[in-house]
């Protein structure tokens, strides 16, 4: 079984999304695949988290804001699943209730209380590809909560823990982790492998800190690579 997560820039339009679809299709030739999906695009794109946030205001309750912000991932997961089925894959998009990530009532940056893989295991038997909306969870009474910015990375390692899988593949628009920003420094060095501790010390925005910390605690390897190239990327372990 493979777990792969795609960031918002990897699925921001049909052309980019095709790369992600091809990766899943290729993996599915030998493995069952669980896809963690982010909201599509960045600020200005209709379903991005920042765009959705701009539709609200200070008068919304925390519960209402969490529901608003969750819509990007919910739309992405169903749209991506539809495209997988169009390619002939036996795919299913989970609802936030089926994912099994149970949190406290800190709606905008929730703390995980427990993981319940009951529904996930049933669905794995029935489908070849499962699509899970990252970032979105639920509290103990079934209300939507969110895992904080970059929370889709965190979702990927939580799902790995649920299923006893020791590696996740995180696909993004960069081809690895560098010692400095390669857009600003042409001599930036890309790491082939890096420790969890070193990754956290870099203060890089490429990976969510909660994701890295949880992966370290549970010995889950993170393989970060580009959706758009065949570069080997960087392993965080």
Image (cartoon, rainbow, N blue to C red):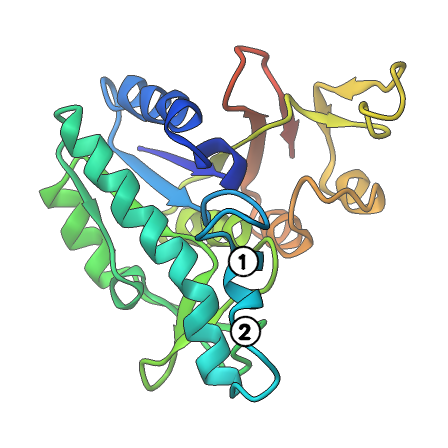
| Disc marking residue 229 | none
Residue 100 visible somewhere in the drawing = yes
Q: Is residue 218 left or right of residue 47?
A: right
Taking 165 as reference, is 52 left or right? right
Depth check, front residue: 50 or 144: 50
User: Which is nearer the N-term, disc 2 or disc 1?
Assistant: 1
Q: Where in the figure is residue 38, as x and y percent of width and height? A: 46, 47
Q: Residue at x 53, y 84 (%)?
A: 62
| Camera sees residue 105 | no
**Mark 1, other Cα within 10 Å: few <14 / some 14–19 / many ≥20:** some
Q: Position of residue 65 (x, y in %)?
A: 50, 77
Pick whichever, 68 or 140, lies toward us: 68
Which element type, helix, strand or loop, lies under badge 2? loop
Q: How many marks?
A: 2
Which residue position holds label 1?
51
The relative height of residue 127 versus residue 65 in the rendered view (above or below) is above
Residue 110 badge? 2
């Amino acid at each position: 079984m493979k777990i792969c997560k795609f960031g918002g820039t990897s699925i921001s339009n049909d052309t980019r999304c095709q790369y992600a679809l091809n990766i899943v299709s290729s993996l599915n030739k030998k493995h069952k695949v669980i896809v963690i999906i982010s909201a599509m695009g960045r600020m200005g794109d209709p379903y991005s988290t920042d765009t959705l946030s701009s539709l609200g205001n200070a008068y919304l309750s925390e519960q209402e804001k969490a529901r608003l912000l969750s819509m990007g991932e919910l739309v992405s997961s169903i749209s991506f699943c539809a495209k997988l089925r169009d390619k002939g894959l036996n795919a299913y998009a989970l609802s936030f209730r089926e994912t099994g990530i149970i949190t406290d009532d800190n709606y905008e940056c929730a703390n995980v209380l427990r993981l319940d893989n009951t529904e996930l295991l049933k669905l794995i038997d029935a489908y070849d590809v499962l699509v899970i909306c990252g970032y979105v969870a639920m509290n103990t009474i079934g209300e939507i909560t969110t895992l904080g910015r970059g929370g889709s990375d965190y979702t990927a390692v939580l799902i790995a823990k649920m299923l006893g899988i020791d590696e996740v593949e995180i696909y993004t628009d960069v081809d690895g982790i560098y010692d400095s920003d390669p857009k600003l420094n042409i001599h930036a060095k890309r790491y082939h492998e890096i420790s969890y501790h070193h990754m956290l010390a870099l203060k890089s925005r490429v990976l969510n800190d909660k994701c890295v910390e949880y992966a370290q605690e549970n010995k889950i390897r993170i393989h970060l690579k580009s959706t758009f190239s065949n570069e080997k990327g960087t392993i965080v372990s």
